[in-house]
Amino acid sequence: MNILVINPIGDNCWDESDRRFFQSIASPSTKMDVVSLDSGPLSVETIRDYETVKPLVIDLALKMYREYDGLIVNCFLDPGVHELKNLINKPVVGPGESSLAFGSIFGGRLGIVSIESEALKLIEEKCSILGYIERVVSIRGIKTHVVDLTRNWDRVKMELVEESMKAVGDGAEVIILGCTGLAGLSKGVAEAVRKPVIDPAAAALKMIESILSLGLRREG
């Protein structure tokens, strides 16, 4: 399997670390390239950011998809994913839809912990559009913004645990990390809160591997 991962930001600072993370959990036959946009915001935390990157993601995907078996748009808000599903005949998945699907299959009430920003409203809308809003009992955010995540991982982990515990207090039985910048932190959070925690980037990778393994593709 040859997968294209698009980071929907105008900065390639995450590309190599993301590639290493994906490759570390990928099936032996899976290879991937990680690319970012030529221009755009440094993170997707506002409605304006989301609307800005969506056409840029679509344009880049349409230029590159033919060389790959499938695509991941590496942002929990899944910008451009719905549109691309109707434009190309190869699997396209997003971390948001994949995490919610896995969480729903696993069972129980869901809590989402992301970044404290306008993105929380977009996440709520996504849960409603995809039909999961009845399962989601808590949507919370940490105070550290995406561009600052790498400055103090200990603080980020502490905030994640705190907000996840609040989500559990709201009734959540499964926690979903609602930002792909938090990739790799699910295990530590799960150990602290003693609940299953879904990593959105990992969920997207395993979803597209499953789709490709099943031989599913759109006609046309």
Image: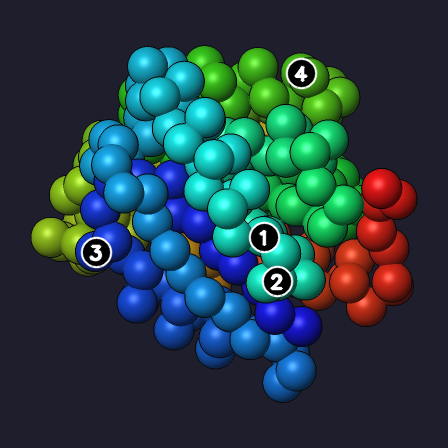
Marks 3 and 1, the one that precedes in the sequence: 3
Q: Amino acid at mark 1?
A: Tyr
Q: In the rendered view, does 51 fall on the left or right side of 171?
A: left
Q: In the rendered view, does 99 fall on the left or right side of 152?
A: right
Marks 3 and 2, the one that precedes in the sequence: 3
Task: Look at 40% across and 68% down and name the residue there.
Answer: 19
The one of 92 and 96 positioned closer to us in this rendering: 92
Q: Pointers 1 and 2 in contact (CB under 8 A)?
A: yes
- CA separation, marks 1 and 2? 5 Å
In the picture, which quadrant includes the C terminus?
top right
Comparing labels 3 and 1, the label whose residue is closer to the camera: 1
Image spot of residue 21 (x, y percent): 42, 69
- CA separation, marks 4 and 2? 31 Å
- Disc 2 marks which residue? 68
Q: Amino acid at mark 4?
A: Ser
- CA separation, marks 4 and 3? 32 Å
- Disc 4 marks which residue? 128
Image spot of residue 8 (x, y percent): 38, 40
Task: Look at 24% across and 31% down and name the residue there.
Answer: 41
Can residue 31 be seen here? The reply is: yes
Number of residues whose C-alpha sits closer than 10 Å to that of mark 2, classed few (under 14), some (14–19) or many (20 or more): some
- Disc 1 marks which residue? 65
Q: Secondary structure at mark 3?
A: loop
- Disc 3 marks which residue? 13
Q: Amino acid at mark 2?
A: Tyr
